[in-house]
Amino acid sequence: MSERVTMPALGESVTEGTVTRWLKSVGDSVEVDEPLLEVSTDKVDTEIPSPVAGTLTKILAEEDETVEVGADLAIIGDPSEADGGDEGGDGAESDDSGGDTEEKKDESGAQRESEETAEETPATPSAESDEPEKADTSQDSGEAPKASSGGSGGGGEKVTMPALGESVTEGTVTQWLKAEGDEVELDEPLLEVSTDKVDTEIPSPVAGTLTKILVQEDETVEVGADLAIIGGDGGDDSGAAEQDSADEEPEPEPEPEEKPTDTSEKDAPEEKPEKAEKPEKADSPTEAKASSGGSGDEQVAEETSAPAKGASDDAESPAKAEETDASAYVTPLVRKLAADNDVDLNTLKGTGVGGRIRKQDVLDAARAAKEAAEKEKEAPAPAESTPAPQSAPSGSAAPSTVPQPSDKRGTSQKMSRLRKIIAQRMVESLQTSAQLTAVVEVDMSRVAALRARAKADFEKREGVKLSYLPFIALATVETLKAFPVLNSSVEGEEIVFHGAEHLGIAVDTERGLLVPVVRDAGDLNIAGIARKVADLAERTRTNKVTPDELGGGTFTITNIGSNGSLLDTPIINQPQVGILGTGAIVKRPVVVQDEYGNDSIAIRHMQYLVLTYDHRAVDGADAGRFLSTLKKRLEEGAFEV
């Protein structure tokens, strides 16, 4: 019995998704929950697992095809059902093989011409001897993308700006990961683009040479616009170019060692400068390419050097290429997760199909690194006891707190799309509402003592760390219930008092400031708020938060003390009428009064709470009463953890 795989719902406002890569082919066996394909939406790249075990009998949605939620993607059934499809596939393969025969004939003719040219110019044995090997390798590989790109009449394969969401109409090229003349593999990241809400990488649709870049960095183009050309003139015709250059330069026989230099300069003037120095070595193009490119080009050089290493390497190349193709491709989601957790993907051994690195592999590596770091912290005494005598010299010690100068000094850069949106909304907020700021100082000593006693058991029980934010968030939503004017919004000539407290939490990310929302925060306790905040913050930093979770807030908290700031004047997130800033908690001597009215000086944990409010809806007296009530609630320190 067949089972249909459908496009799942990946968010409340997400209505469609794009198939980015099939991890299985028709006829392959799949297990329950084994990753079947990868899909991309406005905000998330994810894998779709197989709902049943069986054989993939039919693929209904091809790669780069966008389908609606609930649409059929594939059919999984018994192996017998896949036989018919396989027979049809064999027929298609036979047709392709006929086309391949024609191509091989053309290539063999070109090879004979190349051999005749080599006989006419015997002074260049090493450069010309590589050509038959390259032709043989291209015949053996039989890659469909290269064949299609080379057969496009010299025009190559165009890379276009994909649709990155239903409402996204344009994107900005932020960085090219490849330069003109570089070799690219199928699905290898080619460039990075940015839209209003997502930064993502665009993979190469075919394998070949990047012959032309049509859109430069920081340029904004519409969806569907051409970005680059792969293959065509200067790409797949490199063999003909080498033949022409060899025909044009038979004269300088007294200096035969310099002729490969001239040939390589005509093929790739910037990529292979070392060919002139080492023309006798068959693998010199690889060395030259590795030296001229950066660390990012070395991997490409290693992959493209295999065809020029002789017949013994050609015999091993299919197995190596299969393993490399499966393990080298990493989804943008996995790559982003690895960067956020400081995990080197080159050190991981993937557990996915064919050795592909999956999200769980990165999470396991990050967890192992964290556990190793904690073990090092637990027993530092023996290591710290020995260098103590070395720290005795005092006067000549160099300062250790001098910040390092940034390489951005004296430069300028264009704003990212997200930076532009943040700037626009902040200016609009100040132009929309009359914003004032009120400040109170809160003694957080009782909360600090409660947190110190409970944080270890809390982390074991709940799986997240206990910070000060859940205490402040719970006290805030309780106070908002008593002062609903701070949990309202202005709509025309009306003030709308919301019936629930949807608490926005400002999160600092590499892309900029984002505000995910804890919905119905008034119904949660400290543990519930802590779990929700930790989950939202993590997914926001790893670009996995959904669009629905970034809107709909009724009041916002921003932790201005996360980097040591005591005070700030936060700007209201429209259409809200209030935002609370929490300063750094510091120990400070303050005057305290006992139950008998006696004053004394004590060391206390003090914090500033800053409230920016919209004077159109909130008076200063209302803001003062709100802050005073919040202050008393926190200083009492009566919380259930």
Image (cartoon, rainbow, N blue to C red):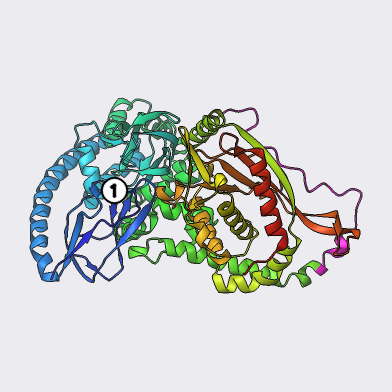
Up/down of 180 relative to 368, above or below? above
> Is 358 in front, or is 180?
358
Q: Which residues are magenta?
A: 385-412
Q: Is residue 508 visible?
A: no
* Image location of residue 401, percent across then percent down: 77, 47
Q: Is residue 386 magenta?
A: yes
Name the residue at 52% across, 41% down: 576
Up/down of 327 relative to 175, above or below? below
> Is 461 in front, or is 318?
461
Name the residue at 23% across, 71% down: 53
Q: How many marks?
A: 1
Position of residue 111 in the picture relative to residue 498 (left or right) = left
* Image location of residue 538, percent across then percent down: 51, 56
Name the residue at 20% across, 52% down: 61
Q: Is residue 109 magenta?
A: no
Position of residue 559 in the picture relative to residue 512 (left or right) = right
* Image location of residue 100, percent across then percent down: 14, 47
Magenta span main SS:
loop
- Mark 1 is surrounded, within 10 Å at the Cα level, by few (under 14), some (14 to 19) or many (20 or more) other residues, namely some
> Is 583 in front, or is 176?
583
Q: Secondary structure at mark 1?
A: loop
Q: Identify the residue position indicated by label 1 in the image.
A: 15
Q: Is residue 127 visible?
A: yes
The quarter in which the N terminus is drawn is bottom left
Amino acid type, mark 1: Thr
Residue 174 falls in image quadrant = top left
Up/down of 30 relative to 626, above or below? below
* Image location of residue 285, percent across then percent down: 41, 42
Position of residue 521 in the picture relative to residue 618 (left or right) = left
The quarter in which the C terminus is drawn is bottom right
